[in-house]
Amino acid sequence: MNKYDNMSFLEHLEDLRWHVIRSLIVIVSAGFICFLMKDFIFDTIIFGPKKMDFPTYKFLCNAATYFGIETTFCGDKFPFIIQNRVMTGQFSAHVMTSIISGFIISFPYVLYEFWKFISPGLLIVEKIRTKTFIFVSSILFFIGVLFGYYIVSPLSINFLGTYQVSNEILNEIDLGSFISLVRSSALGSGIIFQLPIVIYFLTKAGLVTPKILVEYRKYALVMVLILAALITPPDVASQIIVAIPIVILYQVSIFISRIVVKKQTK
C-alpha cells in the first residue's frame, strides 16, 4: 500500500494540478528560449518552406526534372509576399509560435508528468511498459512533426502560393495565415502519428479489438483519404503522399492491437 491508496478525490485533483503546473512551467521555459531565438525560429524554420531552396522543393524539382515532368518546384521564388496588417500581429505571432514551439520541445516531459500521475495505480510490469510508451510516443510525435513540416507544409504552400484564378490578382498572404498553416501542418501531423498509441490504450481498455479494426478498415481508408484531402492541397499526388504513412500507421495499429489481445488472453 502506498500513500495514493488513501487519497481522496480532491487530493488526487490537487496532485494532478501540480503535474499540470510543472508541465506548463517547462513548456513556458522552453517557449521563452524559443522567444529569444526569434531569428532562427522565423527566418530558418517558419519561413523555410517559403524559400525555393528548401530541401523538399529541391528533391521534388530534381525528381520532376529526371522524369521530364513540368513542375512549380523549380522556380526562383514564390509569386506572393507575406504581410502584416494588424498592429499587434507580429508580436502575437512571435508569442504564439514560441509557446507552440515550447510545447513541441517539451512533449516528452509532458508525457513523463502524465506517467507520474497514473503510475501509482499501475502494476510493476505496467510501469516498465509505460516508460517504453513515453519513448515510443515521443518518437512518433517528432516523426509526425517532421513529416508535417517537410511534406505537408511545403506541398500546401507550393500549391496555394502559386494558385491564381487570374493574373490580375496578386497574392499578399497575411502573416497569421501563413504561420497558422505551418504550425497546424506540423502539430496536426504529430498528433495524427499518435494513432498506434491511442489504439494500444483503447485495446487495453477493451474498447477496440483487432477484429473491429480489420472489419472497419475500408471505412478507415476512406476517412484517411478525407483527412489527407483536408490537410493537403486538392491535388491527387499530394493527398497520396500524405495518405500513405497514415495507412501504414493504421496497419501498425492493427498489429499492436493483436499483440495486446494475445497478452491479455494469456
Image (cartoon, rainbow, N blue to C red):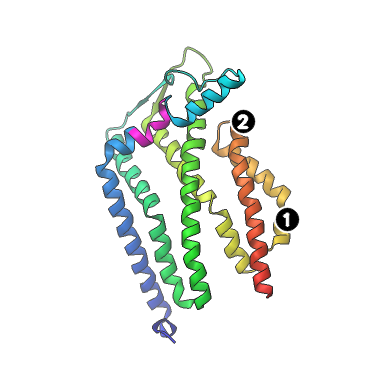
Residue highlighted by disc 2: 237
Instruction: Please report the residue visible at 33 percent of the width from the left and 63 percent of the height from the top.
Output: 21
Tag of residue 191: none
Q: What amino acid does circle 2 point to?
A: Ala
Name the side, left or right, on which 263 lies relative to 18.
right
Residue highlighted by disc 1: 214
Q: What's the CA distance linking mark 1 and mark 2? A: 26 Å
Residue 28 at x, y percent in the picture:
30, 53
Question: From this viewpoint, which residue is outermost toward the left?
Answer: 36
Residue 211 at x, y percent in the picture:
73, 61
| CA neighbours of label 2 inside 10 A, class few (<14), some (14 to 19), many (20+) | few
Residue 100 at x, y percent in the picture:
37, 47
Instruction: Please report the residue visible at 75 percent of the width from the left and 55 percent of the height from the top.
Output: 215
Residue nearest the viewer, comparing 248 with 50: 248
Q: Are marks 1 and 2 in contact (CB under 8 Å)?
A: no
Q: Residue 265, located in which quarter of the rendered image? A: bottom right
Q: Quadrant of the C terminus?
A: bottom right
Prevailing secondary structure class for the magenta stretch in the rendered image: helix
What is the span of residues highlighted in magenta in the rendered image? 44-51
